[in-house]
Amino acid sequence: MTVSRQSAAKARPARPAGRQRWTSFIAEQSKGGAAVRGLHEQANPRHRLRVEHSAHTLLIHLSDEDGGGWTTFAVDRATRQWAVVRDSRQSDTARGAYEALYRR
């Protein structure tokens, strides 16, 4: 499990050359009027995004490009402080990011 807290210690990736075309993640058609809980990249449905929230915390789950792992961002709603965790299972990243955010 890789845990990150707000830090600029790591070098930033190089900016891609040329112009970029930006797109959005999309939702599948709802079945039977049920709420859609996740989004995915239109050209790559294995690349998924999901957001959960409580009164105090946002959990933003982003799958790897191939769907094989997860990165979860935990954000404190009041302060906007955050923590990020990457691992192979979404439940592990959610728990890890939440615990890293509120670690004393």
Image: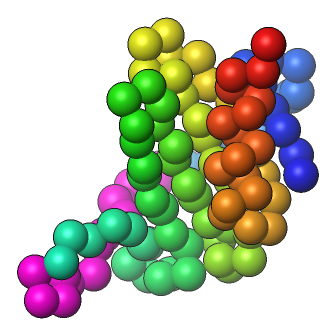
Judge whether 42 appears above or below 32 on screen.
above
Residue 25 found in image quarter: bottom left
- 82 part of magenta stretch: no
Judge whether 9 appears above or below 38 on screen.
above
**Where does the image place residue 28, in percent across and percent down from the top left?**
27, 81
The segment highlighted magenta reads 19-33
Horizontal side of residue 15 vs 34, given as left or right: right
Along the line of sight, which residue is nearer the eye, 20 or 83?
Answer: 83
Judged by its main secondary structure, the magenta piece is: loop
Along the line of sight, which residue is nearer the eye, 75 or 22?
Answer: 75
Q: Work out whether residue 84 can be spotted.
A: no
**Where does the image place residue 101, in percent across and percent down from the top left?**
69, 25
What kind of colouring is applied to the model shown?
rainbow
**View extreme (bottom): residue:** 32
Which residue is painted at 72% across and 52% down in the image? 93
Q: Quadrant of the C terminus?
A: top right
**Where does the image place residue 45, in percent across and percent down from the top left?**
47, 82
Judge whether 59 appears above or below 50 on screen.
above
Horizontal side of residue 54 vs 66, given as left or right: left
Horizontal side of residue 29 vs 83, given as left or right: left
Q: Work out whether residue 24 can be spotted.
A: yes
Judge whether 41 appears above or below 62 on screen.
below
